[in-house]
Amino acid sequence: MPGGTEILAGLDRIRPGLESLYKDLHAHPELGHAEHRTSAEAARRLTGCGYDVRAGIGGTGVAGVLENGDGPVVLVRADMDALPIRERTGLPYASTVTAPGDGGEPRPVMHACGHDVHVTCLLGAARLMAEARDAWNGTLVALFQCAEEPGDGADAMLSDGLADRVPRPGVCLAQHVLPFPSGRVGTRPGPVLSSADNYRITVHGRGAHGSRPESGIDPVVIASMIVVRLQTIVSREIGMLTPAVVTVGSLHTGTNPNNIPESARMEINVRTYDEDTRAKVRAAVERIARAECAAAGAPEPPDIERFGSFPPTVNDEAATRRVADAFARHFGDRAGTLDPQTASEDFSRIPDAFGVPYTYWGIGGTDPGRYARAAEQGTLDSDIPVNHNARFAPVLQPTLDTGVRAIVAAAASWLVTSAS
């Protein structure tokens, strides 16, 4: 029988409680570094299962350690934070939570990326592992990470001594719910998530009256030329077989139609899968911004700030092969290969800090019938809400069951094989 089968025997019994927990977490989302309620619930449940709990790591991070004899140490991570998005799912347990914005104004908060699924599934798997200790040997570390969305949660936990507060793992594992059919699971060796780099570029001009453009240097035109020229990086400087994305997500300038403003500010997001491409795109962004400003006779070079960077997620070949084999045994034809995602994560900073291999996989969260109809009609992009969409709502089941089973199957591929 597949490793982990005995551990999963209790899933039917705990399923109703997990579904209630998920609904509660979904209705009470918290932004990064403010996951106080979520982390307290994780700590409470881990303590009740017999884990040695270390709370407040990096502010709101939680680690539960369950030692169960000699054997490997496996760390499984779930992120906890939500997003500043107004929920439009229509669910009876939809969020109505708000949080203070930068100016103190209330802003809506929603679990639009599925981190509530991740927390629920890890807590379910952690409980099953604790209740079936005769079935495995080793140590399980259940890690609940703060602030994945802003990209600094893993670093915050590491800076607060995470590596000294939990046993050094032999492998790190993580999963994410994604908009493909619920009940399915997929992984892949090598690059699975892209790196991300954000740029804030401020273009300087010379203000003037709108009727006298010759008296000014128009930053609106300069910024517009930069936007157009940036589109040529991927189409003309990157090979067609190398994935890369350059997006101008924000452009702000001016206050009224009759003024040429003093400056324009844009924010740019770049996604790549390898460091060579990352460096090439970064150099091109900066070169284009400076060149367009020089060509327009701007009074000074642009200010270029890089912020909010995420590392690439590159799955270890051997660890991923082991997990993929476990998924094939557990899920049969519902296990497959995950396409590379241009989303980004900070999870890899944790195993990289320990110097250990890792693997990261996806579980489906979309109603299979709805997905099949959209695929048949060619409307996947318009009909299936993706992560960070206000209508993103993973179906309750079999999403939660799949997430719990995937964690147990993956962890068991190290821990059960060493059981006596």
Image: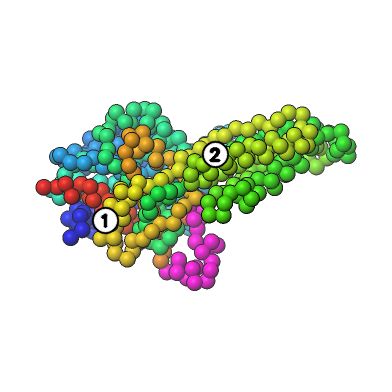
Q: Is residue 382 magenta?
A: yes
Q: Residue at x 28, y 30 (%)?
A: 165
Residue 120 visible within the image: no
Nearest to the observer: residue 363 or residue 87: 363
The answer to whether residue 320 is left or right of residue 260 is left
The answer to whether residue 368 is left or right of residue 203 is left
Quadrant containing the N terminus is bottom left
**Residue at image mark 2:** 279
Nearest to the observer: residue 305 or residue 405: 305
Q: Residue at x 68, y 32 (%)?
A: 302
Q: In the rendered image of this protein, does residue 370 appear above or below residue 296?
A: below
Nearest to the observer: residue 391 or residue 264: 264
Precedes in sequence: disc 2 or disc 1: 2
Q: Which mark is residue 326?
A: 1
Near mark 1 (Cα within 10 A), the count class, few <14, some 14-19 or many ≥20, is many
Q: Which residues are magenta?
A: 369-391
Q: Residue at x 34, y 44 (%)?
A: 358
Q: In the rendered image of this protein, does residue 229 appear above or below residue 89?
A: above
Q: Position of residue 105 (x, y in %)?
A: 57, 37
The answer to whether residue 242 is left or right of residue 13 is right
Q: Which mark is residue 112?
A: none
Kind of residue sitting beneath label 1: Ala
Q: Position of residue 164 (x, y in %)?
A: 29, 28
